[in-house]
Image: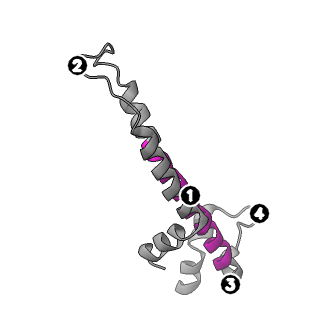
C-alpha cells in the first residue's frame, strides 16, 4: 500500500473526520486570539503566545498520526496472521546476531 493510499484511508476514517473538525475548531478559536503588538502592554520577548499558537495549531495533526499508527498496527497484525513464519521468536540462549542472520547461514550450507 502506498503512502497516498494510507493517507486517504486515514482521512476517510473517524480519525480523519476528527482531524478536520478539530482543525476547523482550532482555527475558529485562534481567530479570537490576539498577539501583543509593539504598542501592547506585553513584552515582545515573551514567546509564550507563539508556543501556545503553534501547539494548538499542530494538535489536529497529532490526531491524524494517531489514526495512522492505529491502522499500521492493524496492518502489522494482519501480516503476521497471513505469514506465521514471520512470527519466529528468539530461542533460549540464542544471540540476536544468530537470530537475524539465520537464513544467510542456511543458504551458505
Whether 32 is drawn above or below 85: the answer is above
Q: Which quadrant of the view contains residue 33?
A: top left
Q: Nearer the viewer, residue 14 or 93?
A: 14
What distance separates the C-alpha of mark 3 from that of mark 2?
62 Å
What distance separates the C-alpha of mark 4 from that of mark 1?
46 Å
- Residue at the spot of label 4: 92
Q: Quadrant of the C terminus?
A: bottom right
Decide if residue 90 is on the left or right side of residue 27. right
**Magenta stretch holds residue 77:** yes
- Residue at the spot of label 3: 82
- Residue at the spot of label 2: 38
Q: Residues within 10 Å of mark 3 (few under 14, many from 20)?
A: few
Secondary structure under the numbered disc 2 in the rendered image:
loop
* Residue 98 visible from this viewpoint: no
At x 61%, y 74%, the residue is 75
Magenta-colored segment: predominant secondary structure: helix
Q: Nearer the viewer, residue 9 or 69?
A: 9
Secondary structure under the numbered disc 4 in the rendered image:
loop
At x 58%, y 61%, the residue is 15
* Residue 11 visible from this viewpoint: yes
Q: Residues within 10 Å of mark 1 (few under 14, many from 20)?
A: some
Furthest residue toward left: 38
Secondary structure under the numbered disc 3 in the rendered image:
helix
Q: Which mark is drawn over residue 99?
A: none
At x 50%, y 67%, the residue is 11
Q: Residues within 10 Å of mark 4 (few under 14, many from 20)?
A: few
Q: Which residues are magenta?
A: 57-79
Query: Between disc 4 and disc 1, whose residue precedes?
Result: 1
What distance separates the C-alpha of mark 4 from that of mark 2?
68 Å
Q: Nearer the viewer, residue 76 or 26?
A: 26
Secondary structure under the numbered disc 1 in the rendered image:
helix
Query: Between disc 3 and disc 2, whose residue precedes?
Result: 2
Amino acid at each position: 500500500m502506498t503512502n497516498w493510499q494510507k493517507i486517504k484511508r486515514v482521512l476517510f476514517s473517524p480519525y480523519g473526520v476528527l482531524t478536520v473538525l478539530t482543525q476547523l475548531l482550532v482555527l475558529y478559536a485562534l481567530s479570537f486570539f490576539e498577539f501583543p503588538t509593539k504598542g501592547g502592554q506585553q513584552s515582545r520577548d515573551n514567546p509564550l503566545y507563539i508556543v501556545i499558537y503553534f501547539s494548538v495549531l499542530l494538535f489536529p495533526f497529532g490526531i491524524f498520526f494517531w489514526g495512522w499508527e492505529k491502522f499500521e498496527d492493524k496492518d502489522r497484525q494482519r501480516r503476521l496472521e497471513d505469514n506465521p513464519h514471520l512470527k519466529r521468536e528468539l530461542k533460549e540462549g540464542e544471540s540476536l546476531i544468530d537470530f537475524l542472520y539465520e537464513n544467510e547461514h542456511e543458504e551458505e550450507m
